[in-house]
């Protein structure tokens, strides 16, 4: 029976080449879009899920509206975190990140570093990273 269906499929494809091309092209484009959307959703749902308490980590964002433009930024005023921790009872700890650039000198060597991050002391209590060397509690 399957052999018969394949024979009819090939005959119809040969008889109606234009419609067959449009149908297969539409199917290919639809499946490609579906797969890309599913990959995007999977990436969004898996973002930073490797941390031990990922379900308890939240990020404060800053929303800005100028005219018709509306943007979200991953930043907030620096004193916001301690103020929220004092006022909101559900916040157990917080950390802030501050990105800087600068020259680092070690002995006679000087390095021009672009991604230097300063963080609060509780950073490694919130985010679980494995250390090759050193102690995160220090």
Image (cartoon, rainbow, N blue to C red):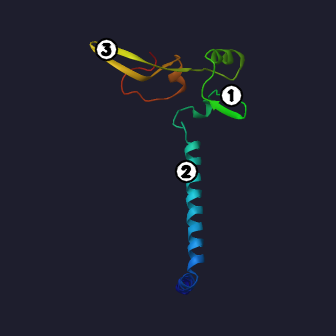
Percent coordinates x, y for residue 123 in the rendering: 52, 22
Extreme residue toward the front, this view: 67
Compared across the picture, whether 90 is left or right of 126 comes to right
Residue located 53% across and 23% down the image? 125
Mark toward the start of the polypeptide (2 vs 1): 2
SS under mark 2: helix
Cβ atoms under marks 3 and 2 closer than 8 Å: no
- Pointer 3: residues within 10 angstroms few (<14), some, or many (20+)? few
Q: Which of disc 3 and disc 1 is earlier in sequence?
A: 1
Q: Residue at x 64, y 31 (%)?
A: 72
Secondary structure type for disc 1:
strand
Above/below status of 124 relative to 82: below
Question: Which residue does the numbered mark 2 point to in the structure image?
Answer: 39
User: Cβ–Cβ below 8 Å for labels 2 and 1?
Assistant: no
Q: CA distance from mark 3 to mark 2?
A: 44 Å
57 over 37 or under it: above or below:
above
For the point 73% across and 31% down, the residue is 67
Tell me where residue 53 appears, x and y as whole percent: 57, 31
CA gap between label 1 and label 3 equals 41 Å
Answer yes or no: do the residues labelled 1 and 3 have beta carbons within 8 Å?
no
Crowd tier of the residue under label 2, counting other residues whose Cα lies within 10 Å: few below 14, some 14–19, many 20 or above: few
Residue 106 - label: 3
How many angstroms separate mark 2 from mark 1 (CA)?
29 Å
| Label located before the other in sequence (3 or 2) | 2
| Image coords of residue 1 (percent x, y) | 56, 86
Which quadrant of the figure contains the C terminus? Answer: top left
Q: Which residue is mark 1?
A: 64
Residue 106: quadrant of the picture: top left
């Amino acid at each position: 029976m399957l052999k018969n269906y394949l024979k009819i499929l090939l005959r119809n494809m040969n008889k109606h080449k234009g419609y067959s091309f449009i149908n297969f092209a539409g199917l290919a484009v639809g499946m490609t879009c579906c797969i890309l959307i599913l990959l995007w959703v999977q990436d969004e749902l898996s973002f930073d899920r490797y941390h031990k308490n990922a379900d308890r980590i939240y990020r404060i964002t800053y929303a800005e509206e100028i005219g018709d433009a509306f943007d979200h930024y991953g930043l907030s005023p620096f004193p916001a975190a301690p103020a929220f921790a004092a006022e909101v009872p559900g916040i157990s700890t917080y950390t802030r990140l501050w990105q800087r650039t600068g020259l680092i000198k070690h002995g006679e060597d000087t390095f021009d570093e672009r991604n230097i991050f300063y963080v609060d002391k509780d950073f490694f209590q919130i985010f679980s990273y494995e250390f090759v060397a050193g102690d995160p509690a220090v």
